[in-house]
Image (cartoon, helix red, strand yellow):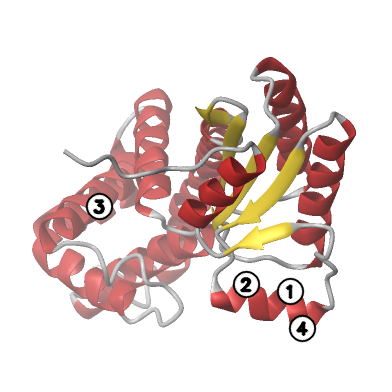
Amino acid sequence: MIHMNKQMAQYIQGNLTEIISNWQEKMKNEKDERAFQVMPVELMNQTSHEFAELMISNLLESHQAYESRVNDFAEKVVRLGWSITFVTKAINHFAEIVYEGMVREEIINEGNIKPFVDEFSNWISPIRDSTIQAYSKTWERTVSLQKIALQELSASLIPVFEKVSVMPLVGTIDTERAKLIMENLLEGVVKHRAEVVLLDITGVPVVDTMVAHHIIQAADAVRLVGAKCMLVGIRPEIAQTIVTLGINLNDFTTTSTLQRGVEQALAWTNRKIVEVED
């Protein structure tokens, strides 16, 4: 008699198209997950086949070959934005479809149901464990790489005119980033001999009390090293939030756009932009 895991693998390989189609339906119906619904059809089909191969490989391949496949798949689904719950659901749905199909075809029957249930458990548990482990490792690595990239990209002080520099702030500002902003700001002011610094918050999605506190601290530090600080890029909704939260920006000069801020900064340094006649 063929060993049970070989029977399971044969059933999956023999009914692959139908199994994948049913599995995709179940995955699309997961209400809280958008990852599958927004995926282009071609990519969805490719990912589904890779997932099915991963499920079969645990039944047939050596542990080493399977582990390398799991790691590759985990990297891919992290990039695609699958959550860890979604990955677990994917494994459970696949096993359910295979089990129901094998019962329908009477490969699993009353006489062998107990050993088959055990076999399914032995099949699914290691897949779940190793996928979650690989997923977590990939996720941690991805997050730390993103953090480094964000630090490299953000918070540089750019001299735009002599004595006038701009620091564009992009993304969410937490305590760690605020520290980096402060360091770069003070170093930049001294290095570029800036007299006026424009902090541009156009790219900051939310300004709450904590973010405002960090910005005020940065501005105070700039004043201590002898430069003026201006806050630019205040969108109407941010202005509303600042007023609602009762944040005091009275010590600041603020403007809605970077352009107005630059004009004001030039006025402070006794210059202005004029149009030249041809």
Q: Which residue is farthest front?
A: 277
Q: Residue 258 location, x and y as percent?
A: 50, 52
Closer to us: 28 or 20? 28
Mark 2 Cα shell of 10 Å, populated few (<14), some (14-19), many (≥20): some
Marks 2/4: CA–CA distance: 10 Å
Q: Which residue is mark 2?
A: 238
Q: Residue 91 location, x and y as percent?
A: 41, 60
Marks 3/2: CA–CA distance: 48 Å
Q: Earlier in the sequence, mark 2 or mark 4?
A: 2
Residue 52 is labelled as: 3
Kind of residue at badge 1: Ile
Marks 1/2: CA–CA distance: 6 Å
Closer to us: 126 or 25? 25
- Identify the residue at horizontal 56%, vertical 77% (top origin): 236
User: The C terminus appears in which quarter of the rendering?
Assistant: top left
Mark 3 Cα shell of 10 Å, populated few (<14), some (14-19), many (≥20): some
User: CB atoms at circles 1 and 2 under 8 Å apart?
Assistant: yes
Q: Which residue is mark 1?
A: 242
Q: Is residue 91 visible?
A: yes
Marks 1/4: CA–CA distance: 6 Å
Q: Nearer the viewer, mark 1 or mark 3?
A: 1
